Amino acid sequence: MQSTVLSSHQEPHADTWHYLDSRDEKHEENYIEWKYFNFTQDDLAGYIIYYIIDPEKKTKLGNGRLLVRILKQGKSYGLIKRIDMNEVDLDAVSASMHMGPARITEKNNYEYEISCQDEDFSWNLNYKQSAPTIESFQNINLTSLMRWEKVNWLIKMPRAKVTGDIQIGKEIFHIDAFGYSDTNWGQMVPFFTKYEWGQYNDKDFSLVFGVLFGFFSMKSSYFYFVLRGHLVAMEKSKCEIRHLKWSYDSSIGTKIPSRSSFSAKEGEYEIEFTTHLLYSDDPGMKIHPLLPKVVVSEQIVEYEGVVKSSGEILHSFKGRGFQEWTTKTWRKLSLTF
């Protein structure tokens, strides 16, 4: 059996800014790294991303990006800011950094504080890890177009306790929720990258999955779940995804999956679940003026599913979580870069 079971008391994998280890490599203009944080709380959800893109500034895209989005009852609030690399300071031995008005402070291996003081938007959130870190794929080639393409995924906090406040204008949101955080880095060609991703948490269970596609078919899949403190990794599973229903998204001018089913089986373990779209947010990426924008549809969905071992149900789950799906559009959108 390929599945791996780890104790919840395992020391978390160290999280750093990997650009500092890679800055002398070729193709620096294609380097991108980001740390992603989210939370779900009743009818309120949010995500915050700290990007560095082409940090050597070899192209016009080069610089930092700060993205924060809050979704409440189907409405989206937030901002996307471009930050000059002169205002970005990365710590050499931890996840800590500052980017203009925003900060990540690694208090210890298990606890981060993320904060920002901006005239239109501010937040102060504490992320306390409560599930073991997952070191997923390393140095994989997403598209097979460029031999130098190498991408990595570290799921730093599959589940975290998130507390703090977010202020949008005069409105203050008090957060006491489950959250999630991961890090992606490497050299890639975003225009040709296609993937699906999602994550869900409850008090006993955490699910994270990522599926990578080539031009015509699924290339690889990664399903992880943490149940009562133990991690099971299914990285060579028999996986099936079916998009059962599609809905037109007027903001991007195309249909997106609104109901989907997923299944993965490896060794004695099997997981089956459906997702139902509640609402979505669609920031885009402008790679070239003659090409359509790449869209990462960030979705709040209702999960419902079961985990089995040797045919016996170990856990049933139902609740809200995040999902991402990629597409392209010519529509005018809020741009991450």
Image (cartoon, rainbow, N blue to C red):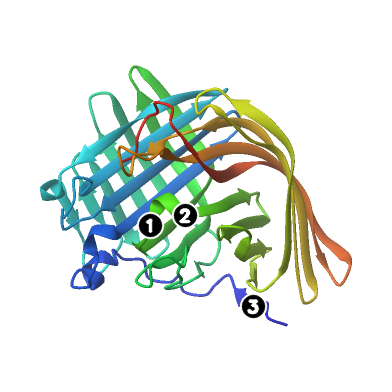
Type of the residue with mark 2: Thr
- The answer, for residue 273, to whether it is visible in the render is yes
Nearer to us of marks 2 and 3 is 2
Q: Distance from label 2 to label 3 (Cα)? A: 28 Å
Q: Label 2 belongs to which residue?
A: 193
The amino acid type found where label 3 is placed reads: Thr
Label 2, label 1: how far apart the Cα atoms are = 7 Å
Residue 129, x across and y down, in percent: 48, 58
Indicate the quadrant containing the C terminus: top left, top right, bottom left or bottom right: top left
Q: Is residue 165 above or below residue 145?
A: above
Q: Inspect this view and state whether residue 317 appears.
A: no
Residue 79's disc is: none
Q: Which mark is residue 189?
A: 1
**Residue positioned 10% across, 49% down in the render:** 86
Left or right: where 101 falls relative to 258: left
Q: Nearer the viewer, residue 43 or 237?
A: 237
Residue ID for mark 3: 4
Q: Earlier in the sequence, mark 2 or mark 3?
A: 3
Q: Amino acid at mark 1?
A: Val
Dot 3: what SS? loop
- Residue 35 x/y as whole percent: 37, 53
Q: Quadrant of residue 18 in the image? A: bottom left
Residue 246 at what x, y percent from top left? 69, 34
> Which quadrant of the structure image shows residue 187?
bottom left
Which one is earlier in the sequence, the residue at label 3 or at label 1?
3
Q: Is residue 233 above or below residue 200?
A: below
Residue 266 versus residue 288 in the image, above or below: below
Q: For the residues marked 3 and 1, what is the alpha-carbon distance in whole angstroms?
A: 31 Å
The quadrant the N terminus occupies is: bottom right
Displayed quadrant of residue 102: top left
